[in-house]
Amino acid sequence: MKAAMTPEEIKAQKPYLDWSLSEREYNYISEKLLGRLPNYTETGLYSAMWSEHCSYKKSKPVLRLFPNKNARVLQGPGEGAGVVDIDDGQAVVFKAESHNHPSTVEPYQGAATGVGGILRDIFSMGARPIASLDSLHFGELDNPTMRMKVQNTVKGIGDYGNCMGIPTVAGETTFDPCYSGNLLVNAMSVGLMNQKDLQKGTANGIGNAVMYVGAKTGRDGIHGATFASADFSDENATQRSAVQVGDPFMEKLLMEACLELIEKHPDWLVGIQDMGAAGIVSSSAEMASEGQAGMDLDLDLVPQREPNMSAYEIMLSESQERMLLCVVKGHEADVKKIFDFYDLEAVTIGRITAGHNYVLHHDGQVVCDIPVSTLTDDVLEEASEEREPARLQAAKAQPAWQPTILNAEATLRQLLAQSTIADKSAFYQQYDSQVRTSTVFGPGSDAGVIRVRGTKKGLAMTTDGNGRFVYLDPEIGGKLALTEAVTNIIATGAQPLAITDCLNYGDPNDPEIFWELHHSVMGMAEACRVYDTPVISGNVSLYNENNGQAIHPTPMVGMVGLIKDINHVIPSFAQNAGDQVYLVGQTGNDFAGSELQKLMLGDISGALNDIDLTQVQAYSQRLLREMQAGHVASAHDLAEGGLAVGLAETLFNTDLGMNLDLTHLTAAQLFAETGGRFIVTVPAEATPDFEAAMGSDAQKVGEVTASHWLQARYQGGELNAAVAELQTVWKEAIPCQLKSKA
Amino acid sequence: MKIAVIVFPGSNCDLDIYEALHTVCQADVEYVPHKATSLAGFDAVMIPGGFSYGDYLRAGAIARFAPVMKEVIRLAKEGKPVFGTCNGFQILTEAGLLPGALKRNDSQQFVCKTVPLEVVNNQTIFTKQYEAHERINLPIAHADGSYYADQATLDALEANHQVVFRYAEENPNGSLNNIAGITNQAGNVLGMMPHPERAVEAILGNTDGLRLFKSLLTYGTVKA
């Protein structure tokens, strides 16, 4: 770090440009907000707080399109995580966060600290984390570098979550060349709380203490927030200093101490917030802003891991496992006693002051004295140019691609071996999915299901992001992302409650990319309204590019649903021979963006067909009622690879088969990826009720058999496959690629 | 029978074993923090899984020095039941209450799945409700579960029937003699890598672990 420049030198030499603060913003701050030149520390604080990562200055106008309220939402976006009422005075708390940039540079620590950060967001709300999920998008496994990155990402997620004792119960892992230079690592955490324990990130009450708890502050992760707000290129390939290092053991202690404080001594606590992106400055400024308070901090009191840290470094460090508390004056020693038991630091580093200024002392000098709101509220929103990507117009002009399938069984085998479809147990077996002994369904199911101990309730949860569809049509792709999440949740017998999201896109300064962002959010927002699943939390990750090549626009939807009676939870595997098999939803010629297209053409192209959200919602709700009435034995939603892959998956890990009449479908349609569909098995005695309820939205296609064969007649042909052989293909594909020496 | 569940910094299966005993088995059970200096009044001790002290240095290596361990050792020497699963097994070997050591899995990876086991010895206070050589399935979730001891120790374990559970089909971690769980020579201290406390409720899909706790609790009743 250079010796601090004078304000005049900063104005002349413009170091802030390297910190992603523009000259327009710098001038606005000095001329309009401060009426003077900001000093070195202040300039650093502004650059971090005004980064896209902290301020959402570019994405805010788009994010306003999302609905974020309904009768169940107790806390929408803006706090550590969103909160939803699940009755009985309880609430579910959840949020997802991206850690794409750090994970691309250093997959192990990037992924690990991604998990750590999202867990802190949950327990800072007063909730105990009960489950983790992930959404991972990698380049193809055909080269050793990517295999190493995949293995290290998985190990990072596992090592952190396993040590914390939070089960990883669901997620998704996909592979596409577009993620080779910029991985997507999105982590989601779900917490459970009593509504009375709900906390806020706020600070007020003159004289109250600002307490720093947890790990010491080091030089790691400085400018992580601005780092995440710029593109990758070969020139900045080694940005490791911006990557944080995680210590899950420290976080486990921090979690226990914070939850003990919140649950047992709420009267000592005014507010609590995680020190995430932009470290002390963002947590303290946001808390003061929320509480409309002034704040005075003495940085010499901040526990430090390294000597001679500057004010700038202390404030912007993203060292992990730290929290900031606002504690009622007089209870500092009480709070310290709790943290002492866990051998954690707990230090009063400042006080709430009258007025609204944010004042920092360091080495006996005032190094910052600015209005709080200039850091948090006065950020200049940026109107972005947008333009429909040329490829979309071109695609609409092309005739739709119609695949010709010569041998359906061979195609099915090939699809089952596609890395995005193949069995992911090689990854998820590295995650403890059962700790806390409440996991009803773990990884490998349509959605993870956790029972709520002491009640009859269960929570279903899933992550879904399909960049291929959004790339081909952002708006329809956005609707399909929500639809896939809804069908995953419904398939377990749960009512979808709300969503969190990670919006992963390329450089928003490119008008075509901004158009992708805008239009996919339009599609998602419309679907959120139809499905009554408001957005209660989330994050935006822009600048996912490497050498000017953007990822597919990949909004990730994290959805949670409520199961009223856990005894009615629905498995995704066929249960009994003799059960009748139904296909719910219509199948169309939806091949653009499908795994079939990628398999046959090597790439994706074409225009998407729109989806009737209202219709999907109507029959999904009827299906859910049938499940609650006990008329459904199993349900599985259809996604990548379409019906044929879905049928095979329904039979894996069972000793059952199916005999099906699919003569209303062509061979190709067996692999179409039309959204909003389920394969459902129904006990014979329940079929009259089921058919009466579902009407033409469910078509009977056959029955579950005792022989372990998948037999299906379709237009002009017959599929006859031993399920055990299909399962071997599906199971061995990824381990085989991971072991490859090539 | 009053049972202590020891909570070390970083323990994370303490809740699971507590709930298995308290809610499922209606046993008299209490959490005891690692800083406790007395286990007076307790008749049995549970050492839960997790990552005590972050597994830093070596799994279980630091926990053995926690203040409460002196009392755990005292109870073990008095012949009271002491049970450790996963990290608890590692701690019991580090504390010298069980022979051998748990090394890194031969895959070098953490592994979480359900594996078939053979109940090799159903004559212990922990296993008497199982059939001799019964096949059961229990979850494992560990990175350091590869049981190792020198040949003389292994021979003695086998000769004394101290091997209680063995991996029945695949060996998931490279344990010698496919060992999944052992007792001390007196038979009152059991350590095992699989998690019976994760398999005590039908809603979670497996109840094969329930009889381990029931065995122990019946033993308590008979003694009393």
Image (cartoon, coloured by chain):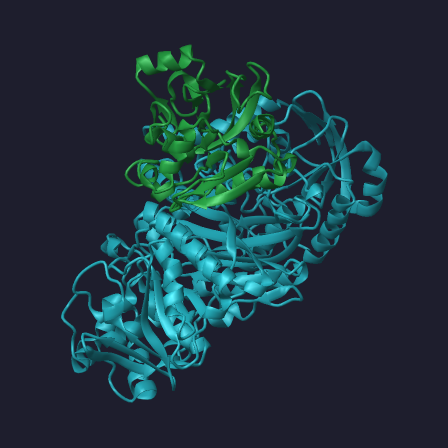
Q: Is residue A368 left or right of residue A91?
A: left
Q: Is residue B88 left or right of residue A82?
A: left
Q: In which quarter of the image is residue A677?
A: top right
Number of numbered discs on residues: 0
Q: Which residue lies furthest to the bottom in this view?
A: A35
Q: Is residue A477 left or right of residue B59?
A: right
Q: In which quarter of the image is residue A194?
A: bottom right
Q: Where is residue A582 in the image (x, y as percent from the top left)?
A: 74, 37
Q: Is residue A550 visible?
A: no
Chain identifier matching the cyan colour in the rendered picture:
A
Q: Can residue A537 be seen in this view?
A: yes
Q: Which of B171 and A270 is in front in this view?
A: A270
Q: Where is residue A498 in the image (x, y as percent from the top left)?
A: 60, 59
Q: Nearer the viewer, residue A555 or A622?
A: A622
Q: Which of A5 and A340 is in front in this view?
A: A340
Q: Position of residue A517 (x, y in %)?
A: 48, 63
Q: In this view, does A72 lie above or below A406?
A: below
Chain B colour is green
Q: Which residue lies furthest to the left in this view?
A: A3
Q: Where is residue A203 in the image (x, y as percent from the top left)?
A: 43, 75
Q: Is residue A52 left or right of residue A413?
A: left
Q: In this view, does A490 lie above or below A78?
A: above
Q: Is residue B52 above or below residue A683?
A: below
Q: In which quarter of the image is residue A331?
A: bottom left
Quarter in which the N terminus of chain A is drawn: bottom left
Q: In this view, does A293 lie above or below A523?
A: below
Quarter in which the C terminus of chain A is drawn: top left
Give the residue drawn at x 24%, y 62%: A304
Give the residue drawn at x 33%, y 20%: B149
